[in-house]
Amino acid sequence: MASVTVRNLPDETHRALRVRAAMHGLSTEAEIRAILENAVRPDGRIKLGTLLAEIGREVGGVDLEIERDTKPVAPASFE
């Protein structure tokens, strides 16, 4: 996983981040990750699978609704 260093962050900004993190019950680092994630990958974005399913329904009634098996999988054995 990548890591980023932010230099020259004003003390007031760092303090505000610490307060915001505390209000959300997170570490400052976790709060910064959440802020960055929300900024670059908003919830309202269209996901590829959703878009393809919609196109399939429009062009021919292709139904891509799949029942997923949620049962736990047995671990692999190497013996």
Image: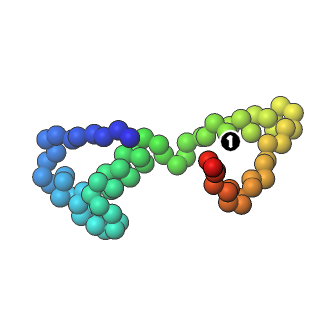
Q: Which residue is mark 1?
A: 50
Residue 51 screen position, x and y as percent: 68, 37
Q: Residue at x 28, y 67 (%)?
A: 22
Left or right: 40 with respect to 44? left
Density class for disc 1 (Cα within 10 Å; few <14, some 14-19, many ≥20) is few
Residue 36 screen position, x and y as percent: 36, 46
Left or right: 64 with respect to 40? right
Residue 52 screen position, x and y as percent: 71, 35
Q: Quadrant of residue 50?
A: top right
Which secondary structure lies at badge 1? Answer: helix
Q: Residue at x 63, y 49 (%)?
A: 79
In the picture as drawn, the residue positioned furthest to the front comes out as 79
Residue 70 screen position, x and y as percent: 71, 59
Residue 2, placed above or below residue 78 = above
Residue 70, placed above or below residue 1 = below
Which quadrant is home to the N terminus? Answer: top left
Residue 6, placed above or below residue 26 = above
Q: Residue at x 75, y 34 (%)?
A: 55
Disc 1 residue type?
A: Thr
Left or right: 12 with respect to 24? left
The colour scheme applied to this rendered structure is: rainbow
